[in-house]
Amino acid sequence: MQSVLDTLDSVILGKPEQVRLSLACVLARGHLLVEDVPGVGKTTLVKTLARALGLDSKRVQFTNDLLPADILGTAIFDNNTHSFKFHPGPVFTNILIADELNRGTPRTQSAFLQAMEERRISLDGLTRDLPNPFFVVATQNPREQIGTYPLPESQLDRSLMRIHMGFPSPEFELELLKGHRKNAEDIPVILNQTEILRLQSEAEKVHCSDLVVKY
């Protein structure tokens, strides 16, 4: 885990707390919502996380004309078999990067509420399981920006953590301007699907006293 943290810190400069929380969210089988203004590294964080964990990831750029079928998939008629064939959407992956989630309309935002809660989707009368593990790592722009829609409580409730990136300190901003950081594509793959499932099982065994639970 320390190797993963060190690798993420080499790309996301000066944000050790946000990096640590993101990794903790993965181990706790939760979904992550990263909120802040454009240009502070939200998308870089989630892309780097997916790369280091060695999981299959897909990115959806939310816009106001995005449809639910663009996320879940759709059934298309096949002339050869004279039947409908399901073409899975980007939600069928280990890490779904929902970039600028609140730029999508409420109808599109709600398209994968079931996916976030149950790790499966119901479409055309059939229920299809999503890959295991499955996480949604979403970024959100401030609500006062033009072209955004507020996320409903049901959507926020499905996110285990909601973190803010914040602006970098002058020291790290200077390093960024000099180009002294790695790109997400250049870092090594450290974990894999089997190891992450094992680590999640280990995390479930962590003891938590009743005093902490009551607090």
Image (spheres, helix red, strand yellow):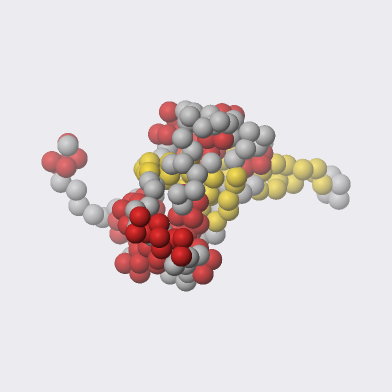
Relative placement, left or right, of 126 versus 175 is: right
* Residue at left offset 65%, top offset 37%: 66
Is residue 48 visible in this depiction of the protein? yes
| Residue 42 vertical position relative to residue 103 in the rendered view, above or below | below
Quadrant containing the N terminus is bottom left
Quadrant containing the C terminus is top left
Residue 162, image x and y in percent?
A: 38, 41
Residue 105, image x and y in percent?
A: 59, 30
Residue 118, image x and y in percent?
A: 47, 41
Relative placement, left or right, of 186 versus 26 is: right
Is residue 133 visible in this depiction of the protein? no
Residue 35 vs residue 75, the one in the foreground: 35
* Residue at left offset 44%, top offset 30%: 154
Q: Quadrant of residue 213?
A: top left
Residue 190, image x and y in percent?
A: 43, 69
Residue 190 vs residue 115, the one in the foreground: 190
* Residue at left offset 82%, top offset 47%: 78
Tag count: 0
Residue furthest toward the left? 211
Residue 55 vs residue 114, the one in the foreground: 55
